[in-house]
Image (spheres, coloured by chain):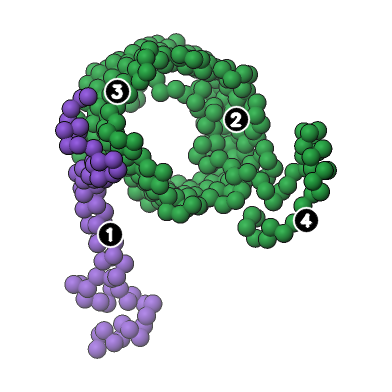
Chain colours: A green, B purple
Amino acid sequence: MAGLVPPGIPAVPADVSHTAHTKHDEKTDYMNLPCPIPYEELHREALMSLKPETFEGLRFDFTKGLNQKFSLSHSVIMGPTEIPSQSAETIKIPTAHYEFGANFIDPNLMLIGRVMTDGRLNARVKCDLTDNLTVKANAQLTNEPHMSHGMFNFDYKGKDFRSQFQMGNGALFGANYIQSVTPHFSLGGEVFWAGQHRKSGIGYAARYETDKMVATGQVANTGIVALSYVQKVSDKVSLASDFMYNYLSKDVTASVGYDYILRQCRLRGKIDSNGCTTSYLEERLNMGLNFILSAEIDHRKKDYKFGFGLTVG
Amino acid sequence: MASRVSLKTKGKGGKGSKGSDEKSAAQCLKEWSTWAMKKAKVATHYGFIPLVIIIGMNSEPKPQLYQLLSPV
């Protein structure tokens, strides 16, 4: 484990290391592995391409910066909102709300708060106590009783590992750990215990990344097996595919998607084995003015969602 | 007398033989922590956004008060 062995290894002679580097064949220095990405961001590249934040209806976001660190945001969202229903058809209720947000972003402290017209508060706090220790808190508070959630995370970042401890309401406890094994490969595991639902789980994850591709895999005893693969075809194009299998409920989903990052726009799309196609376009009309189009067509459930929006600032 | 007997027989029905107005330490702690969490939830619900605004208005360079409300 990093940190236990003093850094007194004999250095490779300079000329040998130079030729080794030019041959792109470096001997891996197992004492100097890079720090892995956080456990919850394991599938980050795949999620960016395959799960854009699609919405239905109108969305208007206005962010006003008061100084470098502090900004206020005003959002108007109008559109049908889905409510969970037991039957196969989706039930949508038209809603409109205004959301006010305040953000304070400092290198050491980040505070983000959003409050809606119906009184729901969404708060996120991230505080770097030291170089290696970070405290994060996340809360969704509502006026209805027993519908509020909160979670605290304590992250410790080591030289080539990261560990995290989570505490949430409803006696939810979790811990995860990820370690770099080679410069490209990292392995991790997590455990969680939900007191209120009397459930516990353990899971393992692996991630292999190079400059051109990222492959991740995750298994959990809740029955989920999730594999993903992202290939960076060029600076502008990324292709991603994802496979999720629940071996307890025998549920399978596979999806394939693309992510084009062009000069004036960013276009993401995916198609799913559930018969669902999604597309998300963000077009930069002007400095600080972005136009967003979102479409999600679910052929199996016959659910068609189209949204448009404008983001200012 | 009864309380001394209950001290000697530690494991056997220790809680049951105590008076009805005495609660165990764990129960007290649980009640206080529930009360504290409820107050903290209300305080966070009303106070988080004002807290962020106060911290932001006091950060450098100090923004003016009218900038909070004007859309420019």
Q: Secondary structure at mark 3?
A: strand
Residue A297 position (above or below residue B56):
above
Q: Amino acid at mark 4?
A: Pro
- Chain assignment, label 3: A
Left or right of A216? Residue A30 is right
Same chain for labels 3 and 4? Say yes or no.
Answer: yes
Inspect the image, locate mark 3, and give the three-letter code of the amino acid beneath it: Asp
Mark 4 residue element = loop
Q: Quadrant of residue A16?
A: top right
Of marks 3 and 4, the one in the foreground: 4
In space, the residues marked 2 and 1 are separated at their CA atoms by 41 Å
**Residue A13 in the image: above or below residue A230:** below
- Residue A10 bears which disc, if any? 4
Residue lying at 27% horizontally and 77% vertically, measured from the top left: B17
Amino acid of disc 1: Ser
Closer to the chain start, of discs 4 and 2, is: 4
Closer mark to the observer between disc 4 and disc 2:
4
What number is the disc on residue A48? none
Q: Secondary structure at mark 1?
A: helix
Q: Is residue A44 left or right of residue A121?
A: right
Q: Which residue is mark 1?
A: B33
Mark 3 vs mark 2, CA separation in Å = 34 Å
Label 2 crowding class (10 Å Cα cut-off): few <14, some 14-19, many 20+? Answer: many
- Tag 3–tag 1 contact (CB < 8 Å): no
Figure quadrant of the C terminus of chain A: top left
- Mark number, residue A227: 2
Chain of the residue displaying label 1: B
Q: Work out how far the residue at label 3 is from the one at label 4, CA to CA, in angstroms.
A: 56 Å
